[in-house]
Amino acid sequence: MSLPAFAISGSSGLVGAACVLAWRGEGRRVVRIVRRGAGGPDEAWWDPAAGRIEADKLEGLEAVVHLAGENVAAGRWNAARKERIRASRVEGTRLLARALAGLKRPPRVLVSASAVGYYGDRGDEPLTEDAAPGRGFLARTCVEWERATAPAREAGVRVALPRIGVVLSAAGGALGRMLTPFRLGLGGRLGDGRQYMSWIALDDLVAVIRRAIDDEALAGPLNAVSPNPVRNSDFTRALGRLLCRPTVLPLPAAAVRLLFGEMGRELLLAGAKVVPARLERAGFSFLHRDLDSALRAALGSR
């Protein structure tokens, strides 16, 4: 007997590719929601900007996981880039949620990504899922992004919203971009280094998404982060220690603001001490609760 099928958007990204690999390893059929022309029954075409999607290919699926969105760190923000970031998340999510709501046999669950940017720059305040949203572009975008799932929820689809932290993998994301300068001995803290980094190992994030699919009690926001957020200075020292490289070249806050503008302020200098309260109450078991374990796993170190 075949396993129920899942669909996923953003399947070519770091997290999406890992999810597809894991699910196909279970022997499960995976329908990839793609922008290019669909190449068979296991791909569904969509164009979020044009408001078009092959909804019929999503009929009767068990779950839909939505990870697609413009890379927020691809370049310095200007008005046009910020609108692409916002629209790729909000309009894309709304299109997908409306499509699912209109199906004769909608999925049991929609797992729609959000981000810890929801909380803004919050200093040392521990933040559970009940915390109010913060200020700034990313926080406003996350609020809209999550609200855009409403059509699916109103149609009776359970909606889980993992607020994802910094994903640790040598294959990409923030850690992937850090490795070259750190290996060259050019790594250092950002600003004063006191800002919190709420992180999660890639393997744990894939497991969180899978748990969100399976656990009927998980609906609404879900902090997809390790139980042990760290300050940027501690992260810097841990990565340098593992790579056996010095980390004595800090990038002052003024330089971050000059080089990266608003993006630098919100992505590099801001911090939030986010904790996975709902996952821990649900008994979720993290493979990598501490940073050293996660970094060693990501870099293939023992």
Image (cartoon, rainbow, N blue to C red):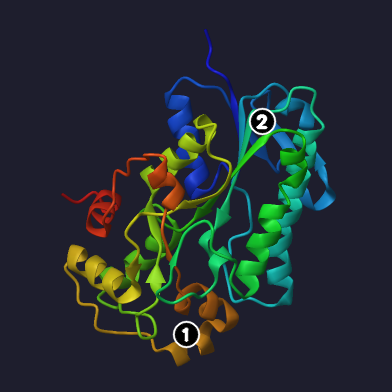
Q: Nearer the viewer, residue 113 or 77?
A: 113
Q: Nearer the viewer, mark 2 or mark 1?
A: 1
124 in relation to 290, above or below: below
Q: Earlier in the sequence, mark 2 or mark 1?
A: 2
Q: Which residue is mark 2?
A: 43
Residue at the image point whose x is 72% and y is 33% from the top = 156
Residue at the image point whose x is 30% and y is 79% from the top = 188
Determine the secondary structure under disc 1.
Answer: helix
| Amino acid identity at mark 1 | Val
Residue at the image point whose x is 35% and y is 80% from the top = 194
48 in relation to 27, above or below: below
Q: Residue 206: x, y in percent?
A: 44, 41
> Taking 125 as reference, is 287 left or right?
left
> Taking 211 as reference, is 93 left or right?
right
Residue ranking furthest to the bottom: 254
Q: Residue 253: x, y in percent?
A: 44, 88
User: What is the spatial separation of the Cα atoms under label 2 and label 1, in whole angstroms?
Assistant: 41 Å
Rendered image: mark on residue 149: none
Mark 2 neighbour class, 10 Å CA radius: few under 14, some 14 to 19, many 20 or more:
many
On the image, which quarter does residue 232 sit in?
bottom left
On the image, which quarter does residue 290 sit in?
bottom left
Q: Residue 77: x, y in percent?
A: 63, 76
| Amino acid identity at mark 2 | Glu
Rendered image: mark on residue 256: 1
Residue ranking furthest to the top: 1
